[in-house]
Amino acid sequence: MKKLINAPEDVVVDALQGIEAAHPELSVDHAHKIIYRADAPHTGKVGIISGGGSGHEPLHGGFVGLGMLDAACAGEVFTSPVPDQMLAATKLVDGGAGVLHVVKNYTGDVMNFEMAAELAAAETGAKVVSVVTDDDVAVQGSTWTAGRRGVGVTVLLEKIAGAAAEQGRNLEQVAEVATRVNANGRSMGLALTSCTVPAAGKPTFALGDDEMELGVGIHGEPGRERRPLASAKECASLLVEPIVADLPYKKGDQVVCFVNGLGGTPLIELYVLYNEVAKVLSKYGVQVARSLVGSYITSLDMAGASVTLLRVDDELLKLWDAPVRTPALRWGI
Amino acid sequence: MSDGATRTDLEQWVRAFAQQVDDNKDLLTELDAAIGDADHGANMDRGLKAVLVAIEQDPPATPATLFNKVGLTLVSTVGGASGPLYGTLFLRFGGAIGEEEPVSPARFAAALRAGLDGVVARGKAEPGDKTMYDALAPALDALDSALTDGAGWDVALQRASEAAESGREATIEMLARKGRASYLGERSIGHQDPGATSAALLVASAYAALRDCA
């Protein structure tokens, strides 16, 4: 294992100290591993928190700031944070208008957020609404599984719900927008390599030089199908076609097209992929209203990419364009 | 009659479980790497080490407070799905075991049943889903029937431990329907479930720690 770390067991703690040092507009509660807006809570504004296992950076801590999240809870690498953390974060950001919990659909995350919401209601009476993202079309037969995983849509949802909260909408309205984003978004990913969890010290799974894994999640869990390595053009079809067929996205639909790197793939390759994705979409007559290209929800050092499409109307598009000022997303200010 | 386990005996069970998880943490992580996310060993080990510190610092006076502390500490330190599941198991166990000692094997079995019911309520697992339930449920059934037959701690816990091990082995051929392993579909078949493996360690630890209770 070659990693730029001090010790495997200190990775999360050390990274939180780095975030605090680099971003004076953010504060860190080191005991609870929470990154939060230094100016929280905002009276009358709906607070939005998220959280999850570490290793997906910049998700979620890199999205804390004006127009997006109020706080993010960091778990151990690929491990959900614990209820105490979400409870503390909920208290930190509650400005009296309630708190939205953005939860990715993984068994552990859902259970820990559930316990936190129960504790928050019992201890503080804070109003909490949870929205669970489950946009990964690679998971089939979701009645026989833990359901679809929350992946790329989480980034877009945090941006759009954050803008709605910043406008002063109430908790029900912010939750409605968030639910609408999840309902209109779909994703699919592929891996060219495994990733290496620092505590494990070796790659989570083995993938040959001439192979790729289609339908991966963001935790180094193997996907649904192993295939021979293919060109960016073929990969674009393999990713986009199941997404388009699933919602389905129709001719004339406007979308935000998000091509995401999984951590170990350079931006030049993501643009090669984006170009192919755009061609496939134009074949379907799906119109790209906005794009986002870069590594925003990652799986440590995994090479690979995911594609997320979000069908938008004028309202969602306006919220997407609204000002945002976070370490990882920043525009309009 | 002194037919029972003292608070100290029960604490030995917790300590034995912590030791077993420490000894097997690489195995648990390896099993998890095959069908999950390669963190079960490290997470359980971290949580149980925190439990040992917590009961050293502020030794609980009764069986109920002991297991309440174990459960709360696991919920706060393990994360993942295992934190809420094992945490809920011990919290419910603590709620049912009561303040009095010694604890009879029947009361122990009833408390473990309450713990298992808590796991089911939190995780919604059903038999054959390839989860910790598939080791715990057969163990509980074996424990109950051994006690009904008039067995004492030693024989009853030995049968429970054997049943947990058979249950754990049976998960190899199961198709995962819960947790991250479920995303693999058919590809989860052929792998032993890490949660059932740690659950079998929990029952084996009970046998090791409580067999000599009389």
Image (spheres, rainbow, N blue to C red):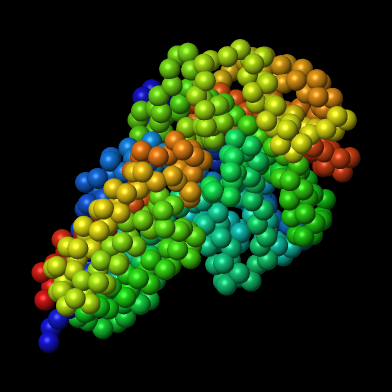
Vertical side of B162 occupied by A144: above or below = above
Residue at point 59%, 63% (across, down): A117
> Which one is nearer the viewer's eye here, A220 or A299?
A220
* Numbered-mark total: 0
Is any part of residue A67 visible from this angle?
no
> If the image is split into quadrants, where does the N terminus of chain A sit?
top left
Residue at point 53%, 15% (across, down): A229
Vertical side of A260 occupied by B135: above or below = below
Q: Position of residue A103 (x, y in %)?
A: 61, 50
> Which one is nearer the viewer's eye here, A18 or A76?
A76
Residue at point 21%, 57% (across, down): B162
Q: Position of residue B183 (x, y in %)?
A: 51, 40
> If the image is split into quadrants, where does the C terminus of chain A sit?
top right
Q: Position of residue B21 (x, y in %)?
A: 26, 50
B22 to the left or right of B46: left
B105 to the left or right of A208: left
Residue at point 76%, 42% (across, down): A184
- Which residue is situated farthest in the bottom direction here? B1
> Which one is nearer the viewer's eye here, B95 or A327?
B95
